[in-house]
Image (cartoon, rainbow, N blue to C red):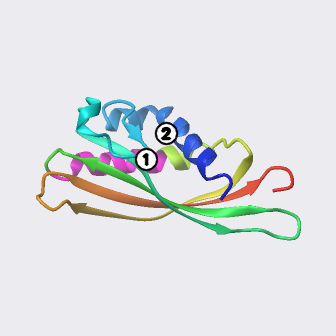
Amino acid sequence: MKLSLPLQRALIDHLTAYQPLLDALDGPNIHDAPPHRSSGATAATYLVIGDETVTAFSSQTTRGAEHEIVLTLWSAIRGYATLKSAMAALYDALEETPLTLTGGTVISLRFLAARTSREARGRLRRADCRFRLLVEHDGDG
């Protein structure tokens, strides 16, 4: 639990450094909450660092946590092609390069599942992508 915020920051830094994802999102449209209209955000497709479940993951010699994180892609573009391209880029971003974390080490990062859907009025497409990260705390935990 103690590395939840550093992990979120590391994810944002890591994902904004991955050019194919930025191309799929038409820029660094990665947020920790959906952008509000008043912010002036106009991106048709963006990613939100979403819900997280943290569970203890420790042994006699190490302390850590299992983080299950939902990364949600949103798109106002009709159809699913843009959204699915962004999903592939997100997957590649997390699979191709190790995630660097302050205060701990990500010892495992695994894709769990993805689900696409249309929002109520059909204006937005959504993809919830779930990932599992095992994190060892540096030092005494």
Taking the spot 54% from the left edge, 35% from the top edge, the residue there is 13
Taking the spot 51% from the left edge, 40% from the top edge, the residue there is 12
Disc 1 to disc 2, C-alpha distance: 8 Å
Q: In the picture shown, does residue 37 fall above or below 123? A: above
**Residue 44: horizontal and vertical position, in percent?**
22, 38
Taking the spot 83% from the left edge, 62% from the top edge, the residue there is 62
| Left or right of 84 in this view: 118 | left
User: Residue 90: which numbered mark, if any?
Assistant: 1
Residue 86 appears in which quarter of the rendering? top left
Task: Identify the element where label 2 is drawn.
Answer: helix
Q: Nearer the viewer, residue 84 or 49?
A: 49
The range drawn in magenta is 79-92
User: Residue 15: which numbered mark, if any?
Assistant: 2
**Residue 50: horizontal and vertical position, in percent?**
43, 54
Q: Nearer the viewer, mark 1 or mark 2?
A: 2
Q: In the picture shown, does residue 11 fall above or below 20? A: below
Q: Is residue 85 magenta?
A: yes
| Left or right of 97 in this view: 18 | left
**Residue 20: horizontal and vertical position, in percent?**
41, 35
Q: Is residue 100 magenta?
A: no
- Secondary structure that dominates the magenta span: helix
Q: Amino acid at mark 1?
A: Leu
